[in-house]
Image (tube, rainbow, N blue to C red):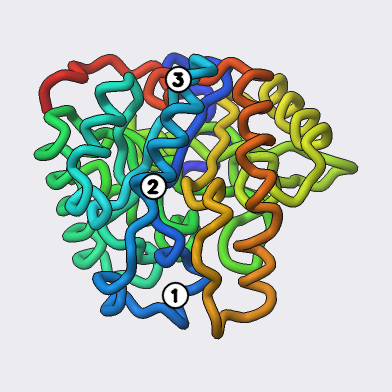
Amino acid sequence: MKNHNEKRGAIDSYYRRRSALSVDVEDYFQVWAFSNVIPRSSWEGLTLRVGESTRRVLDLFDLSGAKATFFTLGWVAERDHGLIREIVDRGHELASHGYDHQKVFDQTPTEFRDDVRLAKEILEDISGVEVVGYRAPGFSVDARSLWAYEVLADVGYRYSSSTHPIEHDHYGDPHASSAPFCPINGTPFIEAPVATTEVFGRRISCAGGGWFRARPYTLSKKLFARAASTLEGPAIFYFHPWEIDALQPRIKGASLKSRLRHYINLSSMEGKLNRLLHDFTWGRIDDALQFSYDRKAA
């Protein structure tokens, strides 16, 4: 593979600078933080809340005029066909988050291929549109799993937004590219990292998630504005529908660190998000990367 810096010039025609919005559609009990206390075998017995919270997100987007990319679990799509069609009908991009939130680097290439192919087929069958984008659960495409790009391209995806190039205890590489790049020689497949910026020479996240909930809004806005004006490509923001669901059940047994990360400032998230939606102009990732394809037929 080429050095990331060498790849930037090869894809100038594939992106343009703008703020791109993304939503990782999963329920509160499917997050990494609780995976050691909530086994997948118990998911069927839990009450789904993701449909209601995602529809609240859609309403917020309608009020602000924002468009977004919804990286959706195949598992969720199977259980709420109406939600999938609503995402598409309201003008947003439907993309894949895999089938059931398995970390990429915890799967074999064969297992990963089965996972991303199944998720793509489910989403396309329900929606009737082509699914070209993918985001790895927990940004789990890193040095341990670079093989995933060739699998994704072979299955039919055209881009990934699966890297968070910062220093983190679960994922990331602070030295990796912060700009979109082509990870496979000779193909137009793109990896589009979520937004980061530099503060005192250190790269930090300004892409959303727990950082957005924890920081004062004015600081988050300033950091994201800096990313949008300096990144060589779209500044991509992300969040989860469960982050505006302050009444979700509290999970017992998880570590204090996991609970702090998950529950911090849930009650203020919707208000902060609404301010962000009106302070920037938001679009879909596929549009920000300037894809051209028929969105009406898979």
Residue 77 image offset from top left, x and y in percent: 23, 48
Nearer-N-terminus badge (2/3) = 2
Q: Does residue 186 show up?
A: no
Which residue: 55% across, 85% down? 253
Identify which amino acid the numbered label 3 is placed on. Answer: Asp
Residue 278 image offset from top left, x and y in percent: 63, 19
Identify which amino acid the numbered label 1 is placed on. Answer: Ser
Residue 48 image offset from top left, x and y in percent: 33, 58
Q: Is residue 38 left or right of residue 262?
A: left
Q: Residue under circle 1? A: 35
Measure the C-alpha gap from mark 1 to mark 3: 33 Å
Q: Residue under circle 2? A: 25
In front: 227, or 50? 50
In front: 48, or 134? 48
Q: Quadrant of residue 224?
A: top right
Measure the C-alpha gap from mark 2 to mark 3: 18 Å
Which residue: 57% across, 48% down? 164
| Local SS, label 1 | loop
Q: Outermost residue, right direction?
A: 200
Which residue: 60% across, 62% down? 262
Label 3: how many residues lie within 10 Å, few (<14), some (14-19) or many (20+)?
few
| Local SS, label 3 | helix
Q: Residue under circle 3? A: 62
**Relative to 111, residue 187 above or below:** above
Identify which amino acid the numbered label 2 is placed on. Answer: Val
CB-based contact (under 8 Å), mark 1 and mark 3: no
Measure the C-alpha gap from mark 2 to mark 1: 16 Å
